[in-house]
Amino acid sequence: MFKGGMPNMQGMMKQIQKMQAEMEKKQAELKNKTVTEESGGGMVKATVNGAKEVISISINPEVINSDDKEMLEDLIVASVNKALTSAGKLAEDEMSSLTKGMIPPGLNIPGF
């Protein structure tokens, strides 16, 4: 009846399943990719993976001062936030390579 006008649903489902498997693989790979950002001129460094998990915090002993605890806390927050932003960009770039050409331009779907 609608043979010529109906999309090939089986082919479309296979394509969706393939893309989903590739996305899961890419998400697993992102856990192994890291970004490091710093604050205070390198006094505090935060390393985050592509899954936005904090891997490590490095603090230069020179910045550790019990009289200025708030400054150290601010430097830690700043470096972690920078690293999380960079990790988000990394993940976005990696995922967009999978969906290129599949999602129409202008359709903004988070994580794609």
Image (cartoon, rainbow, N blue to C red):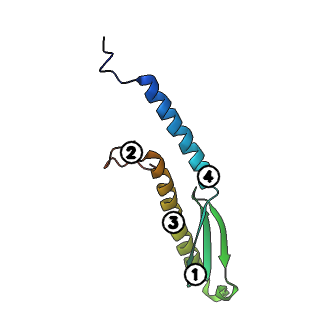
Badge 3 vs badge 4, beta-carbon distance below 8 Å: no
Residue tagged 2: 101
Q: Using the numbered discs, state the Cα–Cα distance from disc 4 to disc 2 in whole angstroms.
A: 22 Å
Give the residue at the far top of this rendering: 1
Relative horizontal placement of residue 67, taking residue 12 as reference (left or right): right
Q: Residue at x 57, y 77 (%)?
A: 38
Q: Which image quarter is the N terminus in? A: top left
Q: Using the numbered discs, state the Cα–Cα distance from disc 3 to disc 1 in whole angstroms.
A: 24 Å
Counting residues from the N terminus, which is met first, the one under dot 4 or under dot 1?
4
Residue tagged 4: 29
Q: Using the numbered discs, state the Cα–Cα distance from disc 2 to disc 3 in whole angstroms.
A: 24 Å
Q: Position of residue 43 (x, y in %)?
A: 61, 83
The residue closer to the viewer here, 39 or 91, is 91
**Count of marks placed on residues:** 4
Residue tagged 1: 70
Residue 30 lies in quadrant: bottom right
In this rendering, which labeled residue sits more in front, label 4 or label 2?
A: 2
Q: Using the numbered discs, state the Cα–Cα distance from disc 4 to disc 1 in whole angstroms.
A: 36 Å
Residue tagged 3: 86
In this rendering, which labeled residue sits more in front, label 4 or label 1?
A: 4
Instruction: Please tell me whether mark 4 sits on a helix, a strand or a loop.
Output: helix
Counting residues from the N terminus, which is met first, the one under dot 2 or under dot 3?
3
Amino acid type of the residue tagged 4 in the rendering: Glu
In this rendering, which labeled residue sits more in front, label 3 or label 1?
A: 3
Instruction: Please tell me whether mark 3 sits on a helix, a strand or a loop.
Output: helix
Amino acid type of the residue tagged 2 in the rendering: Gly
Amino acid type of the residue tagged 3 in the rendering: Ser
In this rendering, which labeled residue sits more in front, label 3 or label 4?
A: 4
Is the residue 79 above or below the residue 64 in the image?
above
In this rendering, which labeled residue sits more in front, label 2 or label 3?
A: 2
